Amino acid sequence: MVTYSDSGVDISLEEVTVSALISKLKETLNYRDVITESGHFAALVKLGNRAIAMSTDGVGSKIIVAEMMGKYDTVGIDCIAMVVNDILCVGAEPIAMVDYLAVEKPDPEIAAQIGEGLKEGCRQAQVAMIGGETASLPEIINNFDLAGTGIGIVDVKNIITGKKIIDGDVLIGIESSGIHSNGLSLARKVFFDDNSFNVEDKLPNDPKTSVGKELLKPTIIYVNPIVELLKTDIEVHGLAHITGGGFTNLKRLKKGSGYIIETLPEPKPIFKAMHKLGVPIEEMYRVFNMGIGFIVIVKSEDAEKAINIIKKHNLVYKIGIAKDDPKENITITTFQEGIITL
């Protein structure tokens, strides 16, 4: 059995580290009219009747897979996706981004490929790339690192925090393209370190594709379905981007709310392959999106209407319900028919 910590990523230690950093910065929230309680996926600053939502993120160790394949034209899409999908979660529409590219050594050809991905990601999200920074850091960076910061706008009265989630609300899951941009350290350990695959090798349970192609598939950008949904009269109670931490991302929403997830779609071959190669089933759902990249939470009577809107853009599933639960448990019926609690 192999876990995320075995790959060098300790989620618990990361949480403690982030808390140590944030504890030193809390007083800065008093300098502006910050809507602190809404900063679960994106932070918000109030400007009159509107608010600016901000989020920052990077591509992570997916860059190593790109380097292994010598293919850099999709990681820019991941960079855009990781930022704008978080901005959506507070009910904001993403409008602009800046990027940060740190390189070991400038390489115009690689930069051009990265730029292609950023351009495509901006097209899909309909955001403007209004600036950025490039730094050469040979003693700090191996190859390159790519990150971005984005802003969105939302009327204060339309901010979505998760506070409105009630017992019986329906969870609607929107399909992912695969592993997206989280858990790559664990995936690389499973395939390349522990089982000696090459990026060109066929995926064990799907000979139509290779390990490298599956790991490099770009993250889906959910701007179109979510923005369309937010412009209707449907009262959206919660939005969650399923990234690092898997389904535990739902715990970023309402305190005292738990979730029962029992009708997930069949996982994609990439996830089944990693489980067969040694990742425990509970770790799979704690680390990976398992085929659901974004979750929308609405009143039960609005579920079908919301699904009909979203399915014009992406595959969508009714996957579970919210439950009042002071322990905030998430119970999941796995693809092996077993039930786990996160």
Image (cartoon, rainbow, N blue to C red):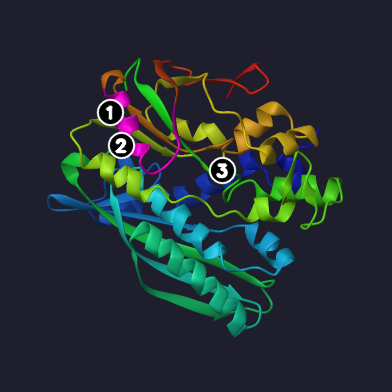
Q: Which mark is residue 309?
A: 2
Q: Is residue 248 visible?
A: yes
In the rendering, at what x and y percent does residue 159 appear? 24, 41
Name the foreground residue: 19 vs 172: 172
Name the foreground residue: 71 vs 65: 71
In the rendering, at what x and y percent does residue 194 appear? 85, 46
277 with respect to 257 (left or right): right
* Residue position for label 3: 244
User: How many other residues sit within 10 Å of disc 3, few (<14), some (14-19) or many (≥20)?
Assistant: some
In the rendering, at what x and y percent does residue 200 appear? 78, 58
Report helix, strand or loop for mark 3.
loop
Report helix, strand or loop for mark 1.
helix
**Residue 168 falls in image quadrant:** top left
User: How many other residues sit within 10 Å of disc 2, few (<14), some (14-19) or many (≥20)?
Assistant: some
Give the answer, above or below, for where 124 lies relative to 146: above
99 with respect to 197 (left or right): left
264 with respect to 279 (left or right): left
Report helix, strand or loop for mark 2.
helix
Instruction: Report the amino acid beneath label 1.
Output: Lys
User: How many other residues sit within 10 Å of disc 1, few (<14), some (14-19) or many (≥20)?
Assistant: few
Name the foreground residue: 202 vs 323: 202
